[in-house]
Image: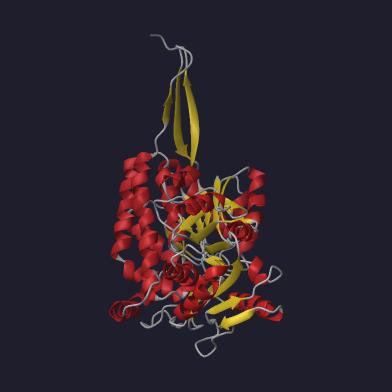
Amino acid sequence: MFLRSSHSITRSLTMCAQRYSSTWPTKSYVNGEWYDAKSGKTFDVINPATGKIIATVPDLDASDVQVAINSANDAFKTWKKTTAKERSDLLRNWYNILVKNKEYLADVVTSEAGKPLPESLGEVAYGNSFVEWFSEEARRTYGEYVPSPIKTKEILMIRQPLGPVGLITPWNFPIAMITRKAGAALAAGCTCVIKPAENTPITALVLAKFAEEAGIPKGVINIVTASRENTPEVGKLLCESPDIYGISFTGSTEVGKLLYKQCSSTVKRVGLELGGNAPFIVFNEADIDKAVAGAMASKFRNCGQTCVSANRFIIQKKVFAEFVDKLKTAMSKLVIGNGKDGSVNMGPLINLAQVEKVERIINDAKNKGANIITGGKRALSVGERFYEPTLITNVTEDMACYIEEIFGPVAVCIEFDTEEEGLKIANSTNRGLAGYFYSRDISQIWRVSKELEVGMVGVNEGIISSTEAAFGGIKESGLGREGSHHGMDEYTEIKYICFGNIEF
């Protein structure tokens, strides 16, 4: 369901916001201390809805991050020896504090990421759930006993923590992308150096503040903030350092490929959750009203800035006109603006570069003959980072909107005839993160679920993310899985122990 704001909830959160902004931490967090860059340099954090500076944080370089790496290594010597029960209890403490401060966290997310407050509350609940989940999974990191083929030997396999890890996270889900990684890493017995996106560093610092309150020891969690200019050298150090044993990155495919190469020098464990180009197929057999509701939820959540956002609406010919008409009507009910306004249900794009990207893609479609059914331009009356919800038809394969991940509030509608043709269009990309389709034909549901070349499938559902489910893609959309019990796999090594010369 598409999130809609409640005036009473928003008034409450707005009052909290007035209290919270003065208590935000604004320094990096290294070895249990609030840390300034050695150079003294800082960078500004901008509220994308207003364009105003809301905080200034340290601009760390590689020498600063090396201090954090050293801290994580020192802490690992003792953290890896804690029991699963001890780690579980500390993560549960952290979770309880996060839940208690959900309004504080929601205010931070809205202030630096631009989401409407109810949507931020939704992310807070989702993000917190990973800490809860992995607090429980910590005690279920089981090994294996294997029957030996030889009478005098016994075979045992145990799981041990990977070591200190580097976690590089994006701006679009500033809480959940950290807790999904850090929750699993800490539960497994790893320590972390976390590099949040330069657009949303405050959320990460707040998470560190609450981890400290929960009793998580110094050096176990380190937060290093860096500007866009310093980010490449920071990322390179984390990837190439022999003292970092794994990298988990969520972001663009292009950056993921670069980090993958940099990690090869130390044969590091790599987890990559990269870009998508999600198909959203509507078959003739679909419930069109439910398909439109799912489309709204999938496409316009966070202003279309999610890696699993529907990117191409592939609609069968018989229902094409009906779907487009109903989607246009639903889009007309979107209210764009500052996320702290109770009437708003769609916020801004994160920065001007993203606005320019969306504008380029729309202009390319216009120039090549696409029909702009609604929207198609900046919403300058609201603010410079806002873009009108846009619906496009008459799309051809040579258009950027057909090929690229848009990451904005743009619904691209493509018509097809047969199931085979729909699947061909859906799979005609080197990305394979998420895919969606709507149908009431059970045979078709099984066929299409198996044939879609993606790591995650939503069947008659537009919102598929869940703590309990394995999140990840195929093709160039990444490596590994996050969340679920599989999330622990990214942070553990399997050690085989052979007991020999046993006498019976």
Q: Nearer the viewer, residue 39 or 19?
A: 19
Q: Is residue 449 above or below residue 196?
A: above
Extreme front residue here?
318
Q: Is residue 387 above or below residue 133?
A: below
> What residue is rendered at 50% in x and 53% in y?
444
> What residue is rendered at 57% in x and 84% in y?
378
Extreme bottom residue here?
381
Q: How is the image coloured?
A: secondary structure
- The image quadrant that residue 266 belongs to is top right
Residue 347 in sight in this render: no
- The image quadrant that residue 122 belongs to is bottom left
Q: Is residue 49 above or below residue 164?
A: below
| Residue 199 image offset from top left, x and y in percent | 52, 71
- The image quadrant that residue 250 belongs to is bottom right
From the viewer's perspective, tell me whether residue 134 is left or right of residue 492.
Answer: left
Residue 246 in sight in this render: yes
Q: Nearer the viewer, residue 220 or 299?
A: 299
| Residue 124 image offset from top left, x and y in percent | 37, 65
Q: Nearer the viewer, residue 304 or 11?
A: 304
From the viewer's perspective, tell me whether residue 346 is left or right of residue 380.
Answer: left
| Residue 85 image offset from top left, x and y in percent | 31, 42
